[in-house]
């Protein structure tokens, strides 16, 4: 029971097992904030590269507007803000090879960047025009759990799968504490054929956590061991080569839902959905809608679900009560109609039981920090 003094102090009223839901699929407007640190003396070069870039971005579907701002205190610090009709068109563009090529002129003049993405919840101003009405606001605040979820995916040379799996399974876990506000909570590794997926959960600053992990000698040793087996070449001693590799490997979380917060024993599985060309975002949204509906069912065996998507690669990480039941595949697969399986994926068979077996990724390792 919440006391009068607690209410007076503004403390939130505790809720029983609130649902955690994070999603890019609510249709509301998106505000993207890019913090840029430019090399001293390269401001004019940066401005010229930006002007070329902004003309190209203006033609991208879903783009509304952008602004370029320079710090009044430090001329090396710049801020780019852009508005998008919704998150999916932005993500489709920012994760594309077109974007990789488009931002290449910026690399020689930029020391560091940080990208932040926000749905618009409220705004002030005059009476809304017809165009403004169409640009939706997020209907209500979402309840989070303080965890940021992200994944990396890459492919290894056919025939090297067992060697790579052993290397990845045997690595020493890095120090989970990054700084006073950031900690590594969990790292889960799975493989599907020659595709590797590494999913991480972080409390605090994701970018700081990724940089922390990359600096750890035990992690660097593992990365060097798998280098000869990668299909995409990388040189970790070359910042540009490493940056390009990890840019292409990024697999963002587009949806997460937790049905309950209690410490329920759960088994983690990963499913890989090879989408048909151009259908990755639509497939991810369909899976997200299924998982949102399932989270409202107290009898659901799927306790948590995270969907990662980039281009035509869709991965769904699920924590389930007990083992996967192939006799009732739909709740675990997230797809209930064989017709949609055939329409959106390249699975050769639409039978849901066989699709579930085909989608299951091989478990490599799952590491949790002691106080996660």
Image (cartoon, helix red, strand yellow):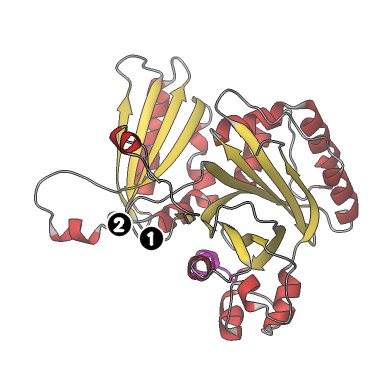
- Marks 1 & 2, CB-CB < 8 Å contact: yes
Across and down, in percent, residue 179 comes to: 60, 23
Q: Which mark is residue 315?
A: none
Looking at the image, the residue that sits furthest to the left is 127
Kindly indicate the quadrant of the structure image that contains residue 78.
top left
| 127 horizontally vs 278: left or right | left
Question: Mark 1 sits on what residue?
Answer: 26
Q: Tell me, yes or no, if residue 313 can be seen here.
A: no
By secondary structure, the bulk of the magenta-drawn segment is best described as helix
At 51% from the left and 27% from the top, the residue drawn is 112
Secondary structure under tag 2 reads: loop
Question: Mark 2 sits on what residue?
Answer: 139
Q: Is residue 308 above or below residue 353?
A: above
Total labels: the figure holds 2
Q: How crowded is the residue under tag 2: few (<14 C-alpha within 10 Å), some, or many (20+)?
A: few
At 59% from the left and 70% from the top, the residue drawn is 300
Report the quarter where the C terminus lies. top right
**Which residue range is magenta in the image?**
275-291
Q: Is residue 3 covered in magenta?
A: no
Along the viewing direction, whichever of 317 and 193 lies nearer the viewer: 317
Q: Is residue 176 above or below residue 270?
A: above
Across and down, in percent, residue 115 comes to: 46, 37
Q: Is residue 280 covered in magenta?
A: yes
Along the viewing direction, whichever of 142 and 6 lies nearer the viewer: 6
């Amino acid at each position: 029971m919440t006391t009068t003094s607690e209410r007076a102090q503004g403390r939130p009223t505790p809720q029983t097992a609130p649902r955690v839901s994070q999603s890019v699929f609510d249709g509301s407007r998106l505000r993207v904030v890019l913090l840029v640190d430019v090399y001293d003396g390269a401001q004019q070069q940066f401005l010229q590269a930006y002007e070329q870039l902004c003309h190209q971005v203006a033609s991208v579907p879903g783009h509304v507007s952008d602004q370029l701002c320079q710090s009044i205190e430090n001329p090396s610090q710049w801020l780019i803000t852009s508005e998008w009709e919704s998150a999916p068109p932005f993500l489709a563009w920012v994760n594309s090879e077109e974007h990789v090529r488009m931002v290449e002129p910026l690399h020689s003049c930029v020391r560091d960047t940080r990208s932040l993405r926000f749905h618009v919840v409220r705004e002030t101003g005059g009476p809304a025009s017809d165009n403004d009405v169409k640009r939706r606001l997020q209907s209500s605040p979402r309840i989070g759990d303080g965890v940021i979820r992200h994944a990396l995916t890459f492919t290894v040379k056919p025939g090297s799968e067992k060697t790579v799996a052993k290397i990845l399974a045997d690595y020493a876990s890095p120090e989970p504490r990054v700084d006073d506000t950031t900690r590594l909570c969990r790292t889960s590794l799975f493989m599907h054929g020659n595709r590797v997926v590494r999913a991480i959960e972080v409390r605090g600053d994701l970018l700081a956590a990724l940089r922390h992990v990359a600096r750890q000698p035990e992690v660097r040793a593992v990365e060097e061991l798998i280098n000869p087996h990668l299909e995409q070449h990388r040189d970790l001693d070359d910042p540009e080569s490493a940056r390009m590799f990890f840019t292409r490997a990024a697999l963002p979380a587009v949806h997460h839902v937790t049905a309950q917060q209690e410490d329920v024993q759960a088994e983690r599985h990963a499913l890989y959905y090879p989408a048909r060309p151009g259908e990755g975002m639509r497939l991810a949204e369909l899976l997200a809608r299924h998982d949102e509906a399932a989270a409202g069912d107290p009898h659901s065996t799927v306790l948590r679900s995270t969907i990662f998507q980039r281009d035509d690669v869709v991965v769904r990480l699920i924590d389930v009560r007990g083992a996967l039941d192939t006799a009732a595949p739909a709740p675990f697969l997230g797809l209930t109609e064989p017709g949609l399986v055939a329409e959106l994926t390249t699975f050769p068979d639409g039978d849901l039981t066989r699709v579930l077996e085909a989608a299951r990724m091989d478990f490599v390792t799952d590491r949790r920090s002691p106080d996660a």
